[in-house]
Each structure stands twice: as C-alpha cells, then as structure tokens.
Image: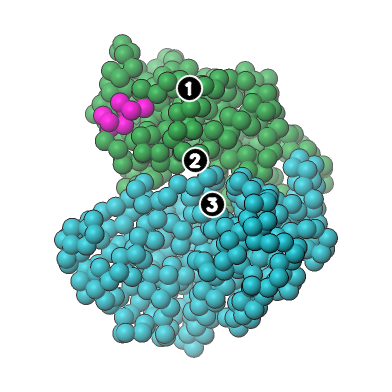
C-alpha cells in the first residue's frame, strides 16, 4: 500500500478517530453522514455541496466545516476518506481527484456513467492502494448474502437461469426537471435503478458475457427511460433476464426480486425472504422447499438508520481503512463490471432502435 | 398512556418479513372502510389508542371519526410524523426547497412570498413548526395527547448530532398541541443519552423490543439495562420481530421486562387482535 497520507503507522490509524468528508449533501450524502458519524471512532469533519442553503443549515446547527468545492475541501481539511454522493456525472472527476491525493474513497452507485471511466478509477485506486467502495448496498443484505453462499457452495448445482426484477414508484407522473431526469447527469432508470439489479445479479452468478437484447422505455419521463428490460448470456451457458420499472406504484417502495434456477434446485430471494428448493439436503436446508427470513439472516449493526445494509457497508469501508486491507465487497473493480453491463444494455437498446 | 396500543403497519403495506404479504395487505386495505372496520374491532375490544403514521390516507380515517364523535368518544391518536417516503421521494424528485413548499401548503408558507421562503427555512426550528402544523392539520379536533417523530427522522438527527432539535420538537408540541413528545428509534440506548443531554426529561420512546434482538441497535443487554435504569416511558414495538417469534413466547419475554410501559402491535383479524391483547393482559395481570 502507498504511504499513508499523514505519515502514520497502521496501529496509530487503527485506534484514532477516522476523519470523513462528505461530497453532496442530498438524501444519500446525509444518510452516509449520519451513519458514519454515529459509528464508534468515526466523525464527519467537513461537508461539500453546491447548495448554500443546505451548507448554512449544517454549519449553523451541526457546527460542521462546509465547502462549496470538493477540491478546496480535500486540500484544506485533514481527511482520511470521502463519501461521494453527487449526481453520477460528477463521480469520475471527484473520485480521481481524491485518489490522487491519497484519500480512501466511497462512491454512491453507479460508479460512473461509462465503463471506461470506471475502469480508470479502479486501476487508479489499485495503484494508489486506497480503499475503494461503491454503494451497492444490496450486497450487505442477509438474504442476498445467504443466496450467494448457497450458490458458491454449489448446494443447488449449476445455475441455468437467473431472473432479476425491480419495481417501484419513483416516477409515476410527469415531473419537474432535476438531475435524475437528465440523461447526461446520470438520470434514468438504467443508471439510477436497474444498476442495483444488474449488480445484484453479478454478485450472485457473476457478470454476463453477452447482452443480446435490451429495451429502454419511457413511460412518464420525457428525456430518460422509466423501464429497462434485457436478456443476458453467461459463461457456462446460463441465461438471464432483467426487468425493471420505476413507474410502478403497485408497491410502496423499491421491490427487488431475484429468481435462480439450477440443475439441483432453485431459489427466490428478496430483501426479506429467501425461498430455496433443494434437490438434496444441504447444511440447515432440507430436501424440498425451505424459507428463511431476514430476521434470522441479518447481522446486527451498531447504528440503524434506513436498513442494516447501509450501516454495514459504511462500517466495512471504515474497517478496511483501519486494517489497511483493500479486499472487500463492492470495490471499484466490481462496480466496473456492473457499469460494463449497463453500457452493453444501452448499446443493445440502440441497436434494436 | 394506555398499556396496549394499536399500530398501523398492516394497513399500509409494511411487512418486514414478506413482500408478498405486504402486497396482499395493500390490496386488502385499499379501501379506507376496511381499515376502519379493523379499528372498530380493536376499539370495541377496549384498545383505544391508535399509533399512526401521518400517511395520506390517515386523513380519511380522521374525517370518519370526526363525523361520528359519539361512536369514537374515547378514541386516541398518537400521530407519528412524517410519513418519510412522501418526503424522501419528493426530495429526490424536486429537491429540498421545493419539497418544503410542496408540503407546507395551507400553512403559514402560503402567505409568504416565494422569495421569503429561503429566510424562513434558514431557521430549521421555524421550518420544523411549519411541517408539524402541516402534518397535524388532518387531526384537528381529535385527541392527540402524544406526537411522535418517526424513527427515520429521529435517527437521522441522532446521527447528524442535531440533538437540540429534539428539545425544540418537545417544546413546540407541548406548547402548540398540549401534547407530549414521543420519539421512535432503532437506537434506543444512544437516543436516551442524547435526550438527556438536551434536557428532555422522562421521554416517551418507542423502539423494537423483542426476544431475538431484531433491530435493537446496541444489543439486547443495553436495551434491558436502559429500560431498567433510565427514567423514560418505553413502548415496545415489533415484539414478534415480524412473526419470527411465536406470539406466546414473544409476549411472555417482553412483558417480563422491568420498566416497560406499553406495547404497540398491529393485527388485521378480530381473532388475532383478541389473542394478542389477551396474552398481554394475562402476562401483565391486567383486568379486561
């Protein structure tokens, strides 16, 4: 690993307060801020945003140092790491700047809007030996982790097909323009919503080798897609389908489901429930159908805000910094694989059009 | 405060165990009349307090109660605000300032010219009162002796270390609504420390308290210790851990906890309401 920015030994770093910078004080930025701040031995030292209103409130009531430029924040404040939760189009420049100044970097999903930029960041992070993580929080949900454990152990045989879906009520009527409704800034169902499912499918069965069909459809939005569907092919011959629609108000909030068929069983998993049909008994699973719930599959966390997974990912990021390990879930390299699939989906859609 | 309170998750598609079940419940309670039927069942069994999120549909329930004052003479609401999804979706869509304007319509803000909004919102206490008033509007004329902040907001403030906001919330609901402040949290031990620090005395707090420690941040031990030794009025929610614990076992464990004041639970059928109520009454030795 590269020399530590502050010239200290690992044991010194392991025992002191982690100093954190937040770039982007929107919903995710504030969520990371609150979680990181509540964890033991961590404290948010500075916040950067373009909204002077948000900054003045945080300065006045939380007594926090604020900046309107991330360069200024990074150069002027002693920080160990930053959390980047800006519109996606800004991730690349900001993460690159932070890595070049030897900060550890957490970036909200997706990593960037192009696979090649994501590759550049993954290489840079590896070269500088900095901890690098992307906020695909589903990978920290107990049900999905258990599904992966079963698949990795080969408990259900070889995967033959995977179906991933997400629906939710994000855009259920025509609405005002924000960065989420502008393609160039990272808006649209593909980069803002479908990316979660693509990443989860990658997590469970590995990335596809081919996207051979995809459609992106606008329902209420004028400039971006509200629904994405695609068909995948995997090494070893398995096939996959993806269906996402953020203009579906039949559910209260984002609902993500994965179904996987294997040669010796199958599973259906969402954030609360894991149903497994085993061809042969495995571990605690009996032959036939088994159901397990999040109440028994999720490890507790030190602070809860919106779900254990949000805290678990922040805790994993901070603990990697402390231990000096850069091997962890949701690395830039893994997020690059997701961005690569998103690129392929967009290209397949264009080809179809 | 009553010892047995009725919750509302079952009405609005909140189920921490199964998304399928959540969806079935959404379908079942699509009509407000079907919610009212269940509330009637609970009320007729002697459960008078309804702890409810300030969901859009709560307005229709309030209208019904206001129209039948004799029927619901002893009915008590504990509003829990805000219904966070409404705000979170809006913040993602249109940003913070636009959201404030959107949800405080009908309140003081309508009388302000657009340019003055910024100035008012610089003062988050003033802003908070506008939002509380907007949420409380639908409860006008009804009995709301305790007003809660939902856990997502309580815990956000806790993490941001904006603890003085708790004291200001307490002051405002006491002054304006003659109500006691309540705080829902997933981090009870941490919250109690923060409330003490800002001088909110003997607070009403509501948290997950269940035998398996599900969503009890800080751990079961810290919770049991806090209930026993800290001056507070705790309400247990999620006592069944979304169905992971058998009812009799769940109630037996939670009712033995020293210092626990009340239990809130949700159920949809008269049989389940009665069953849980009887379990609690027997465990606590309450008479029907």
Give x and y (percent) for residue B283. 30, 19
Mark 2 surroundings within 10 Å by alpha-carbon count, few (fewer than 14), some (14 through 19), many (20 or more): many
Chain letter of the residue carrying label 3: A
Q: Which chain is green?
A: B
Give x and y (percent) for residue A82. 68, 61
Q: Was residue B211 drawn as part of the magenta stretch in this picture?
A: no
Q: CA distance from mark 1 to mark 3?
A: 28 Å
Q: Are marks 1 and 2 in contact (CB under 8 Å)?
A: no
Residue tagged by mark 3?
A311
Q: Relative to residue A149, is residue A127 drawn left or right?
A: right
Q: Tell me, for residue B228, which label it has, or none.
A: 1
Does label 2 lie on the same chain as label 1? yes
Magenta span of residues: B247-254
Mark 1 surroundings within 10 Å by alpha-carbon count, few (fewer than 14), some (14 through 19), many (20 or more): some
Whether residue A158 is visible to the viewer of this picture, yes or no, is yes
Does label 2 lie on the same chain as label 3? no
Residue tagged by mark 2?
B217
Closer-to-camera residue (A181/A7): A7
Give x and y (percent) for residue A264. 20, 71
- Quadrant of the drawing holding the N terminus of chain A: bottom right
Q: Is residue A60 above or below residue B231?
A: below
Colour setup of the view: by chain
Closer-to-camera residue (B106/A48): A48
Chain letter of the residue carrying label 2: B
Tag 2's secondary structure?
loop
Q: Is residue B284 above or below residue A309?
A: above
Q: Nearer the viewer, mark 1 or mark 3?
A: 1
Name the residue located 24 percent from the left edge and 59 percent from the top edge: A283
Give x and y (percent) for residue B95. 67, 54
- Give chain A's shade: cyan
Quadrant of the image occupied by residue A51: bottom right
Q: Relative to residue B197, is residue B189 drawn left or right?
A: left
């Amino acid at each position: 690993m590269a020399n530590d920015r502050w010239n200290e030994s690992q044991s010194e770093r392991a025992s002191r307060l982690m100093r954190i910078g937040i770039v982007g004080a929107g919903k995710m930025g504030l969520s990371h801020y609150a979680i990181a701040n509540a964890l033991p031995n961590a404290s948010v030292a500075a916040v950067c945003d373009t909204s002077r209103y948000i900054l003045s409130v945080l300065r006045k009531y939380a007594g926090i140092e604020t900046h309107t430029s991330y360069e200024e924040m990074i150069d002027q404040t002693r920080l160990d790491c930053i959390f980047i939760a800006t519109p996606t189009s800004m991730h690349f420049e900001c993460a690159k700047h932070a890595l070049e100044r030897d900060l550890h970097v957490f970036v909200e999903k997706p990593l960037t809007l192009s696979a090649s930029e994501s590759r550049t960041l993954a290489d840079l992070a590896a070269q500088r030996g900095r901890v690098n993580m992307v906020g695909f929080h589903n990978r920290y949900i107990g049900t999905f982790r258990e599904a992966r454990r079963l698949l990795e152990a080969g408990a259900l045989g070889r995967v033959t097909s995977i179906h991933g879906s997400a629906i939710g009520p994000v855009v259920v009527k025509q609405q005002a323009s924000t960065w989420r409704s502008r393609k160039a800034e990272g808006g649209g169902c593909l980069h803002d919503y479908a990316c979660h499912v693509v990443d989860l499918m990658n997590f469970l069965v590995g990335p596809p080798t081919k996207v051979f069909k995809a459609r992106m459809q606008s329902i209420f939005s004028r400039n971006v897609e509200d629904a994405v569907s695609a068909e995948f092919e995997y090494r070893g011959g398995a096939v996959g389908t993806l269906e996402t629609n953020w203009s579906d108000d039949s559910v209260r909030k984002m609902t993500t489901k994965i179904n996987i068929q294997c040669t010796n069983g199958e599973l259906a998993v969402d954030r609360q429930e894991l149903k497994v049909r085993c061809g042969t008994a495995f571990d605690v699973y009996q032959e036939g159908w088994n159901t397990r719930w999040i109440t028994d599959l999720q490890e507790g966390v030190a602070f809860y805000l919106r779900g254990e997974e949000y805290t678990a990912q922040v805790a994993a990021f901070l603990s990697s910094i402390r231990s000096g390990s850069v091997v962890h879930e949701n690395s830039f390299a893994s997020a690059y694989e997701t961005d690569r699939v998103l690129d392929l989906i967009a290209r397949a859609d264009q080809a179809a059009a | 405060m009553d010892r047995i309170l009725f919750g509302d998750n079952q009405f609005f598609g909140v189920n921490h165990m199964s998304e399928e079940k959540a969806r079935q419940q959404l379908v079942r309670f699509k009509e407000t009349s079907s919610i009212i039927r269940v509330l009637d069942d609970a009320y007729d069994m002697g459960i008078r307090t309804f702890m409810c999120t300030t969901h859009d549909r709560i307005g229709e329930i309030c209208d019904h109660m206001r129209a039948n004052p004799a029927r619901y003479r002893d009915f008590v609401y504990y509003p829990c605000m805000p219904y966070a999804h409404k705000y979170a979706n809006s913040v993602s869509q249109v940003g913070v300032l636009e959201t404030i304007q959107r949800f405080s319509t009908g309140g003081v803000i309508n009388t302000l010219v657009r340019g003055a909004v910024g100035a008012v919102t610089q003062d988050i206490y003033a802003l908070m009162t506008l939002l509380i008033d907007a949420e409380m509007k639908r409860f006008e004329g009804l009995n709301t002796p305790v007003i809660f902040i939902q856990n997502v907001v309580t815990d956000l403030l806790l993490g941001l270390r904006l603890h003085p906001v708790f004291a200001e919330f307490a002051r405002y609901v006491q002054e304006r609504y003659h109500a006691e402040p309540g705080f829902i949290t997933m981090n009870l031990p941490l919250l109690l420390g923060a409330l003490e620090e800002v001088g909110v005395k003997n607070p009403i707090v509501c948290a997950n308290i269940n035998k398996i420690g599900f969503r009890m941040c800080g751990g079961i031990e810290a919770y049991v210790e806090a209930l026993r030794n800290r001056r507070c009025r705790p309400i247990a929610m999620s006592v069944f851990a979304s169905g992971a614990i058998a009812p009799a076992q769940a109630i037996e464990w939670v009712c033995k906890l020293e210092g626990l004041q009340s239990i809130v639970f949700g159920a949809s059928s008269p049989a389940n309401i009665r069953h849980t109520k009887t379990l609690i009454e027997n465990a606590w030795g309450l008479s029907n």
